[in-house]
Each structure stands twice: as C-alpha cells, then as structure tokens.
C-alpha cells in the first residue's frame, strides 16, 4: 500500500477532535458566563466539577452561584450541537441533574435553539437557554441570553445565521482591563455608543 507524503504542516498540526472542540467550548462558555455573571444576578460561574446528588455524583460542565445566596447554584451544561436543535431528552437529562443536586435551575449553552418540547421543559424546570456560537473564543463571540446579546469582536464578526443589529453601549478595554475600566488607560476603548448592523 502506498502512503501519500505529508507536508511538514500536516504532520505537526494536530487536528482538533470533536471531544477537544467540546471541551474548549465548555471552557470558553464558563469564562464568558463568569465575565458577565453580575449582569444576570450571579456571583460567579465556576468550571467543570463533581457535585454530589442524592442519588449519584455528577460531573457538571460548570456551576453558577447566585449573588448574595451562599450555596445556591445553577447547573451549567454545554452542548456544542452544530447541526440540530437541542431535543427534549437532552433537557430532561439536565433537569434530572438539577433535581438530584438540589440546584435552583440550570443554564444550557449551545449554538442552536431548543426544539419546542425542550423549550417547554426549560420553562418548567427553570433552565436558561444561552446561545453561543460554536467557534467562539474569549475575544470573538456572539452570546445571547435573557434578551441580551454580548458580542466580542477581534477583527471580524464570526458567521451568524440570522440578521443581527446591535448598539454598543460599553466596550471592553482593549488594554486588558475590566469592561468597567475607569477611562484612565491608554487604549482607544472609550468610544461613544455605536450602532452596528450586519
């Protein structure tokens, strides 16, 4: 059997696996949720961890702790589905994790919307649907939750399947400071609000 020669880039560049992509998506989702936690009543969002339930122990993609409520939390689960909407069976599994761990509710992060049955489960079980583009990075992302859109733009907007119009109210400091930078940095991050249409 003859093997085709490979160029140096092909041998040295690892090809991301589906699992590696899913793990990276989980990490980015957790960090973005944590970055904007106070905007939706959370104290912090922590990454993957084991949480004991009444029936069994669960490995959760993340745990979101409520502000001013010690010990009260939401289960965070990420589903990087790129070709189909989340089904009711997927949300039912998350709902069971919520009940077994004693969580207040859940946050499910996915690039896709929920199917109608999954929407009904999410509403009944206090599961918040967060849409985050599949190829999100910490600097280039589109995240939608609770009627808000959060957008990070590195150089260009990542592909988005729907029309998008937004008004930039606050820009993150490009010098690496927090989004609530006081304006004493040397970057050009304090521009006036701008409307962007795509």
Image (cartoon, rainbow, N blue to C red):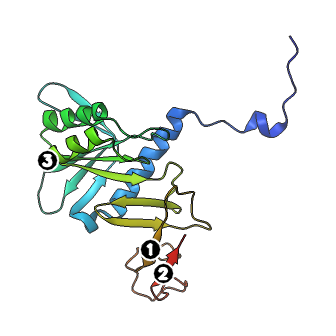
Disc 2 + disc 1, Cβ < 8 Å: yes
Q: Which residue is mark 3?
A: 104
User: Badge 3: few (under 14), some or many (20 or more) residues near its Cα, within 10 Å?
Assistant: some
Label 3 vs label 2: CA separation? 36 Å
Question: Looking at the picture, does residue 47 appear above or below residue 195?
Answer: above
Of the residues under marks 3 and 2, which one precedes in the sequence?
A: 3
User: Left of 172 or right of it: where is 12?
Assistant: right
| Image label count | 3
Please give the residue where the numbered disc 1 appears in the rendered image.
166
**Among numbered discs 2 and 1, the one appearing first in the sequence:** 1
- Where in the figure is residue 173, as x and y percent of width and height? 48, 77
Task: State the SS at label 3.
Answer: loop
Residue located 60% across and 37% down the image: 16
Position of residue 41 relative to residue 189, above or below, is above
109 to the left or right of 125: right
Q: Residues within 10 Å of mark 2 (few under 14, many from 20)?
A: few
- Above or below for 120 versus 41: above
Q: Residue at x 57, y 59 (%)?
A: 158
**Considering depth in this image, is 181 or 144 the residue closer to the camera?**
144
Q: Secondary structure at mark 1?
A: strand
């Amino acid at each position: 059997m003859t093997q085709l020669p490979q160029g140096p880039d092909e041998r040295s560049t690892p090809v991301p696996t589906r699992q590696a992509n899913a793990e990276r998506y989980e990490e980015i989702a957790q960090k973005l949720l944590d970055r904007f936690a106070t905007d939706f009543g959370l104290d912090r969002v922590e990454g993957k961890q084991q949480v004991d339930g009444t029936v069994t122990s669960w490995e959760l993609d993340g745990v979101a702790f409520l502000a001013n409520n010690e010990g009260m939390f939401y289960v965070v689960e990420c589903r990087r589905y790129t070709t189909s909407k989340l089904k009711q069976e997927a949300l039912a599994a998350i709902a069971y994790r919520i009940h077994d761990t004693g969580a207040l509710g859940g946050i499910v992060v996915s690039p896709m919307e929920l199917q109608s049955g999954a929407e009904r489960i999410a509403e009944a079980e206090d599961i918040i649907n967060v849409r985050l583009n599949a190829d999100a990075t910490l600097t280039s992302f589109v995240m939608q939750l609770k009627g808000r859109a959060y957008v990070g733009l590195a150089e260009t907007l990542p592909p988005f399947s729907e029309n998008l119009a937004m008004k930039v109210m606050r820009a993150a400091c490009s010098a690496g400071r927090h989004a609530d930078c006081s304006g004493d940095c040397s970057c050009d991050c304090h521009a006036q609000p701008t409307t962007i249409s795509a």
